[in-house]
């Protein structure tokens, strides 16, 4: 197992980013050595820039529960990329998603889907105000 390219990228990163990477955990200080720079993911595996393959036990902390690049997800992304990814306006797809969430979550009254950080704050203010008006 070689890590020559990862070592070079880590040295480059230390000139650009504090610690050489964008997370103290990724810096490997607690375990020693050089962080592995990942080139791609395939199913349950990560492949670093040196061609070494690893089992991905982290799965990006949850979002990759289906693995890297599963065909159904890639196909769905391709379909969406053909029409656009975000519009800042209502779409039928968000209603489809809301209905799916309601079905999975045992029929809550309403579902709120947010695209940006400020939206959850405004939604809570809106819901809070609605609750106060009921009294």
Image (spheres, rainbow, N blue to C red):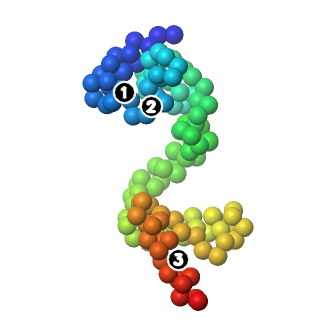
Q: Which residue is mark 3?
A: 127
Query: In the shown orientation, is residue 104 left or right of residue 123?
Result: right
Q: How many marks on residues?
A: 3
Residue 28 position within the rendered picture, expressed as x and y whole percent measured from the top left: 47, 23
Q: Is residue 71 above or below residue 4?
A: below
- Whether residue 17 is visible to the viewer of this picture, yes or no, is yes
Q: Secondary structure at mark 2?
A: loop
Q: Is residue 54 above or below residue 127?
A: above
Residue 66 position within the rendered picture, expressed as x and y whole percent measured from the top left: 62, 41
Q: Which residue is mark 1?
A: 19
First in residue order: circle 3 vs circle 1 = 1
Q: Which residue is mark 2?
A: 24
Density class for disc 1 (Cα within 10 Å; few <14, some 14-19, many ≥20) is some
67 vs 17, nearest the viewer: 17
Q: Is residue 68 above or below residue 124?
A: above
Density class for disc 2 (Cα within 10 Å; few <14, some 14-19, many ≥20) is few
In the image, what residue occupies the spot 37% across and 67% down?
88
Q: Which mark is residue 90?
A: none
Residue 111 position within the rendered picture, expressed as x and y whole percent measured from the top left: 58, 70
Q: Quadrant of residue 118?
A: bottom left
In the image, what residue occupies the spot 48% across and 50% down?
77
Residue 78 position within the rendered picture, expressed as x and y whole percent measured from the top left: 46, 49
Mark 2–mark 1 distance (CA, rounded to whole Å): 7 Å
Residue furthest out toward the top: 1
Mark 2–mark 3 distance (CA, rounded to whole Å): 38 Å
Q: Are marks 2 and 1 in contact (CB under 8 Å)?
A: yes
Q: Secondary structure at mark 1?
A: helix
First in residue order: circle 2 vs circle 3 = 2
Q: Quadrant of residue 83?
A: bottom left
């Amino acid at each position: 197992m070689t890590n020559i390219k990862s070592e070079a990228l880590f040295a480059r990163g230390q000139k650009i980013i504090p610690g050489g990477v964008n997370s103290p955990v990724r810096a490997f200080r607690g375990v020693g050595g050089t962080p592995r720079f990942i080139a791609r993911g395939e199913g349950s595996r990560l492949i670093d820039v040196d061609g070494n393959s690893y089992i991905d036990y982290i799965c990006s902390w949850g979002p990759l529960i289906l693995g890297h690049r599963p065909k159904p997800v890639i196909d769905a992304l391709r379909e969406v990329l053909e029409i656009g990814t975000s519009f800042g306006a209502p779409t039928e797809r968000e209603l489809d998603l809301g209905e799916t969430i309601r079905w999975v979550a045992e029929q809550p009254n309403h579902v709120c889907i947010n695209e940006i950080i400020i939206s959850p704050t405004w939604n809570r203010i809106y819901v809070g105000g609605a609750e106060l008006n009921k009294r």
